[in-house]
Amino acid sequence: MINLMGVRAVQARIAQLQQQFGMPGPVPGMDFQQKLDKEIQRAKTGGTAAAAAGAAAETAKLKDAVVHSSNDAGSTANPFPSYSVNSSLPVADQNLSTLIDAAARKYNVDPKLVSAVAEVESGGNQDATSSAGAVGVMQLMPDTAAALGVNPYDKKSNIEGGAKYLRQMLDAFDGDVRRAVAAYNAGPQAVRDYGGVPPYQETQNYVSKVLDIYR
């Protein structure tokens, strides 16, 4: 017996997405009903195993259509796509990209930029601590973290603090990503004093690495 509950739920979700986002024409996969009816008929005539396999395959395709339709529709409301900072991250840290994406969207920063900074700052490692005392994924100094109202020793809070600080730097320098990244490393006053990226080798290398990943 083919269980149609999951299939009906997916069909209902597609219809909901179509109505919500005003999608013209049929959503991919909506011819599923005809195919499903055909498979059910085959099952009734003795091809149960083959029909079940066919229905399962079509269900998988339909679910994939729902995911793609949802992502495509959502992109019009948010200018930044989801971004995975590092596909080679260990299984224990696979939630890093999710945390970065959420924090970036909270402060309206491109997740890819937050990810690039995290990659250069710590390689995405919350346990990283610099000789100067910077902590966590985004390498926040304790006093900076306090001013941002975050706990640098908690990964989620650390990432939110970094995204918030990047937002502040972008606002301070009129959305100029290069100067904002330089300010993240050397401080906003140094960027103002030099009218751009300070002539510090460390900062210049830092900016180059971040922008290379970001681009």
Image (spheres, grey):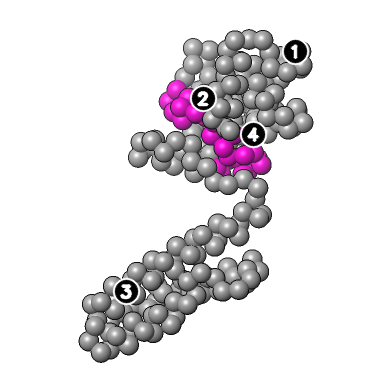
**Mark 3 vs mark 4: in front:** 3
Picture coordinates of residue 87, whole percent (x, y): 41, 38
In the image, residue 208 above or below residue 74 = above
Identify the mark nearer the N-term, 2 or 4.
2
Horizontally, residue 9 falls left or right of residue 82, namely: left
Number of residues whose C-alpha sits closer than 10 Å to that of mark 4, classed few (under 14), some (14–19) or many (20 or more): many
- Residue marked by disc 4: 164
How far apart are the two marked residues, 2 and 4, measured between alpha carbons?
17 Å
- Residue marked by disc 2: 120
- Residue marked by disc 3: 54
Q: Residue 100 versus residue 87: which sits nearer the camera?
A: 87
Identify the mark nearer the N-term, 3 or 2.
3
Tell me which amino acid carries mark 3: Gly
Marks counted in the figure total 4
- Residue marked by disc 1: 194
Number of residues whose C-alpha sits closer than 10 Å to that of mark 3, classed few (under 14), some (14–19) or many (20 or more): some
Q: Which residues are magenta?
A: 101-128
How far apart are the two marked residues, 3 and 2, measured between alpha carbons?
47 Å
In the image, residue 203 above or below residue 70 = above
Horizontally, residue 143 falls left or right of residue 40, namely: right
User: Does the segment drawn in magenta span residue 87?
Assistant: no
Residue 35's image quarter?
A: bottom left
Secondary element under disc 1, as helix, strand or loop, is helix
At 33% across and 82% down in the image, what residue appears? 39
- Check the image and name the residue furthest to the top: 200
